[in-house]
Image: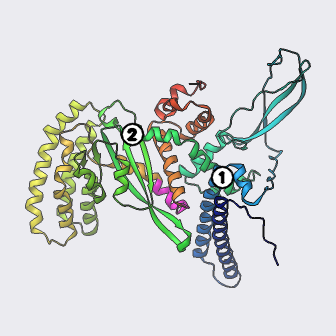
Amino acid sequence: MIPSPDLPNDVEALKRLVVELREDAVVKDLRIEQLKLQIAKLRRMTFGRSSEKAAAEIEQLELALDALEADRAERESEREPSAARARTGEKRKPVRKPLPAHLPRETVVHEGPCACPKCGGTLTKLGEDVTEILEVERRFKVIAHVRPKMSCRTCEAITQPPLPSQPIARGIAGPGLLAHVLIGKYCDHLPLYRQSEIFARDGIDLDRSTLAGWVGQCAGLMRPLIDALAKNVMASSVLHGDDTVVPVLDPGRGKTKEGRLWAYVRDERPFSGPAPPAAIYFYSPDRKGEHPQTHLKSFTGILHADGYAGFNRLFETGRITQAACWAHARRKFFDVFEAIKSPIAEEALTRIRALYAIEEEINAKPPSERKARRQAESKPLTEALKTWAEETSPKLSGKSDLAKAFRYMLTRWASLTRFLDDARLAIDNNAAERAMRGCALGRKNYLFAGSDKGGERAAAIYSLIETAKLNGLNAEEYLRDLLARIADHPVNRVAELLPWNWAAHKNQPAKAA
């Protein structure tokens, strides 16, 4: 008979233990399915034709385990050590593997004081502590922080220089390595298990659960900056908004569910506006209209958006006005032309193309020039287009795709032509669609998020990376410096670390508030 473990008496500790056991069961079930598929693949390789489907299923299971371990590692990092010990008694401290000896090493010696800070007496060296931090530049290296430990001959007090703070307390990862992992996953779209395999080629043993824990802790560390970025973006008077599907693992049902990533972009560069470009992302477990209402609760102004009905409640209040997207209207005619080479669809495309030609010429021009050109040139073109559309569409079959394209355009005419009278507005919503491209590429590579928590984590990191790119920064260099500074940076000056302010402050040490 298997002896029962010593169980804690605390109800909350028991609940946490049940949750952990449930998570362990899910991970083990996934591992069993993975091993079954691997066995099936080996059998086919030996006795029959190989199957690409089996390999793909194995890869999806690897990603599922990656995501589950990420959430579990993040939750463990948030708990107090005493709470963790209370669950099952004193836990054995894990043994950290030494960093590989073949890596180049850089030694940083932290000089101690010349005299005892307590009494001014003479100090005698007792020894030193060496803390090794794994860092990456063009290749891995180890930075050894040497801190001499000194003893006072007069009062026997022991003093030692403090260890510089790290993004992850007591962790081996330097800010450069953390930035490298974040850029790999959210910019270069490399799943963590693939990054782990890449690191292994250099003899670095970094399990994907370790990498997942780092990602979660970095996202938590940068949360004040994400909040400041969101507040800054929502203070704009004009935004671009869009959303895209993010499959999310749903282990209890044995399949994925559809989550959503929402992007809101401020970009005043087309009309030479003073505010720097920025993007903020949000995650939601579904596409209900309540989510954009929550995201935009502090926003007042004009929103570039597609025809998603979930935005309608916002437009009905009068606090937010819609500017529709000509790219969406054009795309419907383009699909018809590509399918049947319709001359009417081609005519619509030619007329819309003329509007875009004017926009290309006035891009980045002052608002006065943009409005004057639109009133003089674009407005007559749109009026002629509407007249032609109203004359042509009744002659078409109401059920045809071409008739639907005309209806889409004419029912949104007021929103489509709003840009003619406001120089701040763009002709389309492509700024938001460009912000979604990276998410779509990432979705193809890592297939799904591991949980709703993982989706929120992705939204936070996408926000900083995309905003850095919009401001012409090297996103990895920015994240490297950000992670090196943010733990010690005064929270009331967190705006200094926003991408458009970072260049002016990156060479200045953080000062206490």
> Image quadrant of residue 49?
bottom right
Query: Was residue 479 drawn as part of the magenta stretch in this picture?
Result: no
Q: Is residue 374 above or below residue 152?
A: below
- Taking the spot 35% from the left edge, 53% from the top edge, the residue there is 292
Three-letter amino acid code at disc 1? Leu
Query: Can you give x and y, in whole percent of width and height, for residue 399 in the image?
Result: 18, 73
Principal secondary structure, stretch drawn in magenta? helix
Query: Can you give x and y, in whole percent of width and height, for residue 212 in the image?
Result: 63, 54
Query: Was residue 448 drawn as part of the magenta stretch in this picture?
Result: yes
Whether residue 324 appears in this view of the structure is no
Quadrant assignment for the N terminus:
bottom right
- Taking the spot 48% from the left edge, 29% from the top edge, the residue there is 501
Q: How many marks?
A: 2
Question: What's the magenta region?
Answer: 439-450
Mark number, residue 86 = none
- Taking the spot 66% from the left edge, 52% from the top edge, the residue there is 211
Given the current orientation, which residue lies at the most extreme bottom position?
47
Three-letter amino acid code at disc 2? Val
Tell me which label, 1 or 2, sits earlier in the chain.
Answer: 1
Please name whichever residue, 52 or 493, is drawn nearer the observer in this view of the structure: 493
**Marks 1,2: beta carbons within 8 A:** no
Given the current orientation, which residue lies at the most extreme top position?
120
Q: Is residue 195 above or below residue 405?
A: above
Whether residue 374 appears in this view of the structure is yes
**Which residue matches tag 1?**
211
**Which residue matches tag 2?**
233
> Image quadrant of residue 42?
bottom right
Q: Is residue 495 left or right of 174 when viewed as pictured? A: left
